[in-house]
Every structure is written in structure tokens, then in C-alpha cells.
Amino acid sequence: MAEFDTGFAWIAGRFARVEPRRQARAFVLGLLSDVDSRSCWQLAEQAGDASPHAMQRLLGEAVWDADAVRDDVRGFVVDVLGDADAVLILDDTGDLKKGVHTVGTQRQYTGTAGRIENAQVAVYLAYAAPGGYTLIDREVYLPKAWTDDADRCARAGVPTEVGFATKLTLARRMLARALDAGTPAAWATADEAYGGDRHLRRDLQRRGVGYVLAVAKSHRVAARAVDGPQRADRLAAGLPAWAWNRLSAGAGSKGERDYDWAWITITPPDGEPTGQHTLLIRRRISDGELAFYRCCSPKPVPLRRLVDVAGTRWSIETCFQTGKSIGLDEPQVRRWHSWYRHTTLVMLAHAILTVIAARERDNQPAAGQALIPLTLNEIRRLFTKLITNTVRPISHWLAWSHWRRQHQARAKTSHYRRRAPIHHSH
């Protein structure tokens, strides 16, 4: 519990009044509990409140700045995990939704489903260091169908100054925020939805941050030994057998993630700063499937380092998986500010788990024992059983049952009233 309190202390000063501060603490504890969902109803019941109103007020009307809390979460992460050789990771994820009123929701492609679905999409920035990895920034994506409809945005509480921004633009803003704040990092990585953008690459080069960015097989680069730009897959096809090196992209749940790797020196476009520019190619051992990465480092680095950075990208996928287990995909809120508040508090909860895991690893004796280090999921299980499993009197649970049924009865009556035919008198 001391580790939880240390983490929460980083944001406590953002709440000027004691009531919202206590409510935020109960909210984050509830995220780490074993409630069925992370709705305000369930979190309030878990916290011992008599109704969900205080939790709803925390995400709605209470006075606090979610962006300032985001900065505190980043500061907490860097304070414990900060490393000069860390990697910043960009990616987006979707949350399938019903209806059209939740901010940013519409039919759009989401990698979560692998197809076009009614969904809300958000872009995230993760920080990966030797001690662990967690999310440090977030932006909800508003499609043009939203930003072109002022009334729709107003109903969802979107600030009037918010205009359309692509996912790439949101990603570049988050990178700039982290680096402007002095976040220590030597590298950035992202999938091909971001890697093909020259503006993102130039942002990183100007700041002296290396990158290993996935690009499409059709991405064109100028290889030193070839005249003019060529498609990445064409260059890969011409490589001799000796050019491939078998290396692991890191340990996975089933062992080392071995691939064959090759790299080709490329000539950067005019106007890009000097550095070591390469095309990195990954070949899957089982079927020969290829993946491509556009790489740049301010100083020469070995192939091994580029492979390590490429392999770090899966860390953000793990953040999504573990984050969704504590409410990242359950913000049962419709409005702009409520989404940012909910998501930022989930990020804090995830960061606390990550920091606990890092400190537990540091305190473990040398390898040789028959236990793996504590994982985030195992720490959360222990948290649920030892910390958040609060005993409440029977009257508390009965009162909540009564409150839910009463609320559902009102909703049912209202629904029937809306559907009832309107009779006009003549």
C-alpha cells in the first residue's frame, strides 16, 4: 500500500479540495480491484459510496486538470524508470462502442477488431526502459465527421479550439510534449501507420533521437549501391544469403522471438540531417514473411541495437492488454473531459503497477530460484486480495441493489415514454 500512496502522492496536489482528492484515490484503488467493470457505479459501490454521484462528479464537474495530472504521471514514471537509452513508442487502439454520442465514436478502422467497426480510437505514447514500460500520454482521435459538426462536438463537451488532427499529428504532439519536458530517451519506434511519415522522422532527427519505424513493403528508399529510390521489398529480394543474421527481438511468453535480419545502408533525402540511415529487414523463420523498418541514429550503432529497438514495439501492445484489464477500454463516459480524466487515472494505476513490478525485480535475489519475477497481472491479483477486498456490511450491498433497481425502473419508464405514440387532438 505504501507504493500505491507514493504513486498517488505525485498527483494529489492537483486537487485543491480534499473531497475530490479522496474520491480520485478511491477511483484509482477501484480500478485495481476485481469489480466487473470500471463504471462509476461499480467503482462507487466498491469504494463504499452510497451512490455513483461523487465518482461521476470527479469525472465531470470537479475542478482539476487532467493534462497536469498526465504530466505528473510522466514525472512519476521517469523518476523511477527513467533511462537515457529508453524508447518512446507510438500506437493507437480502438474501443468498440454502440451508438454515436460518445466522443470520437463513428464507423472507422480499428486494429483492435482488424476491420471497420463503430469505435472510438485513441493514440498513446508509451515509455519503455530496462526497468519496465507503461503509458505516459494519450489523445482521443476526432474524425472529420466530428470536427465538421460543431453542434455534435458541443454536446460532447469538445472545446471550441479543438480542430481536426490526424493520428500522426496527435502522435507528433505527444512526442514533442514528452521531449520538451526532458523525458530521457534515445529512441522512438512505431508501426507503419506512423513510420512512413517524413515529418515524424524529421521531428526526431532534429532532436537527436534515433528511430526504428516500421514502413510498408512499397516504401521507397535510395540504397547506396543502387541508382535511384527502390521499393523496400525489391531491395530485400536482391540480398545474398550471407546478408541475413539470426537474432532475437526479445524474450516472449514462449521463449526468444527469433527472426532473420538484414540491413542496407540508405541515402537520406535532401534536407535531412546526417546520421546513420538504414533499411532494416526482418524475415520470419517459419514462412519467410518480411517486415521493413526505416532507421536512423545520430551515431553509428550495430545491427543488434536496431533489432532491440524494433523488438521493443510490442511493449505498447502489452500496455494495452494490461491497461484494458484495469479500465483502459471501459471509460463509460461520453464527454471529452470525462474521457481524458478517466484515461489519465487508468494510466496512473498502470504506472503504479509497473513501478511496483520494477522495484520488486530490483529487490529479488539473483537468478536461480524457481520463481519468475512478479508480473503486473500477479501484482494486481495480490492488490485485489490484500488491499482492495474491503469488507462491507450487508446493508451496503442491499442499498446498492435497491439503488440500481430504482434507477433501472426510471430508465425503463423513460424509454417506454419516448416510444409511446403521440396522439394529436383535433
Image: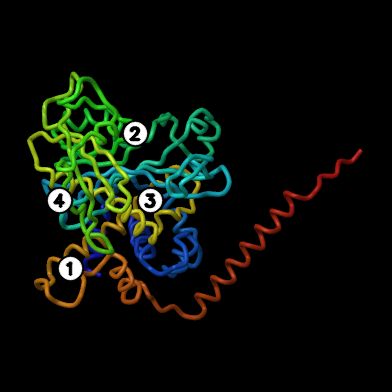
Q: CA distance from mark 4 to mark 2?
A: 25 Å
Among the 4 quarters of the image, the one containing residue 358: bottom left
Q: Amino acid at mark 2?
A: Leu
Q: Residues within 10 Å of mark 2 (few under 14, many from 20)?
A: some
Mark closer to the chain start, 4 or 1: 4
User: Position of 119 compared to 168: left or right?
Assistant: right
* Cβ atoms at labels 4 and 2 below 8 Å apart: no
Q: Nearer the viewer, residue 25 or 102?
A: 102
Q: Which mark is residue 343?
A: 3
Q: Nearer the viewer, residue 71 or 24?
A: 71
Residue extending furthest toward the bottom: 394
Q: Position of residue 170 (x, y in %)?
A: 34, 35
User: Position of 358 compared to 393: left or right?
Assistant: left
* Cβ atoms at labels 2 and 3 below 8 Å apart: no
- Residue 192 to residue 5: above or below: above
Q: Position of residue 139 (x, y in %)?
A: 36, 41
**Residue marked by disc 4:** 82
Q: Nearer the viewer, mark 1 or mark 3?
A: 1
Q: Nearer the viewer, mark 4 or mark 3?
A: 4
Mark closer to the chain start, 4 or 3: 4
**Residue marked by disc 1:** 360
Q: Amino acid at mark 3?
A: Thr
Residue 119 appears in view: yes
Q: CA distance from mark 1 to mark 3?
A: 26 Å
Mark closer to the chain start, 2 or 3: 2
User: Position of 7 compared to 243: left or right?
Assistant: right
**Residue marked by disc 2:** 168
Colour pattern? rainbow
Element marked by disc 4: loop
| Number of numbered discs overlaid on the protein picture | 4
Going 50% across and 50% down the picture, which residue do you hit? 96
